[in-house]
Amino acid sequence: MTTELITVDTITPIESIIETMVKHNFRRLPVLEKGKLTGIVSIRDIIRQPKLEKSILEKLTKLELW
């Protein structure tokens, strides 16, 4: 039995990344480019972005951080 790996792409909008994190209750997601791992995005990475929109921050509050 295999489990589907949940990933995002390098061009995935922040809003979609947050929605995926909320849906699956993840704090980090692997980032792929052309099917190859290029990094990991975390809640902390998103929060540290300058000029985050209020709507994005509100979506983050839906995550269970602990």
Image (tube, rainbow, N blue to C red):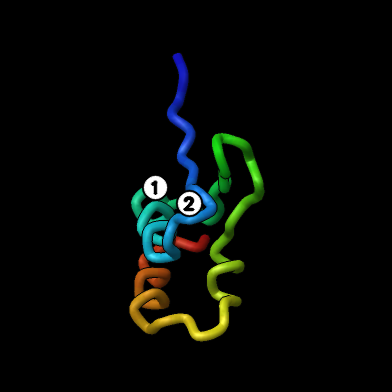
Extreme-front residue of the structure:
34
Q: Nearer the viewer, residue 57 or 13?
A: 13
- Relative placement, left or right, of 21 versus 27 is left
What residue sits 44% from the left and 65% below the top? 14
Q: Say which amino acid is labelled 1.
A: His
What residue sits 60% from the left and 76% below the top? 48
Q: Nearer the viewer, residue 27 or 29?
A: 29
Q: Is residue 18 above or below residue 55?
A: above
Residue 22 image offset from top left, x and y in percent? 38, 57
What residue sits 38% from the left and 65% below the top? 15
Which quadrant, please, contains the N terminus?
top left
Instruction: Name which quarter of the figure residue 62 lies in.
Output: bottom left
**Labels 1 & 2 near each other (Cβ < 8 A):** yes
Secondary structure beneath label 1:
helix
Q: Nearer the viewer, residue 5 or 65?
A: 5
Instruction: Name which quarter of the figure residue 36 lies in.
Output: top right
Residue 3 image offset from top left, x and y in percent? 45, 25
Q: Say which amino acid is labelled 2.
A: Phe
**Mark 1 → mark 2, Cα distance in angstroms:** 5 Å
- Reading the image, the residue beneath label 2 is 26
Secondary structure beneath label 2:
loop
Extreme-top residue of the structure:
1
Q: Residues within 10 Å of mark 2 (few under 14, many from 20)?
A: some
Q: How many numbered marks appear?
A: 2
Q: Residues within 10 Å of mark 1 (few under 14, many from 20)?
A: few
- Reading the image, the residue beneath label 1 is 24
Residue 45 image offset from top left, x and y in percent? 60, 67
Residue 30 image offset from top left, x and y in percent? 57, 45
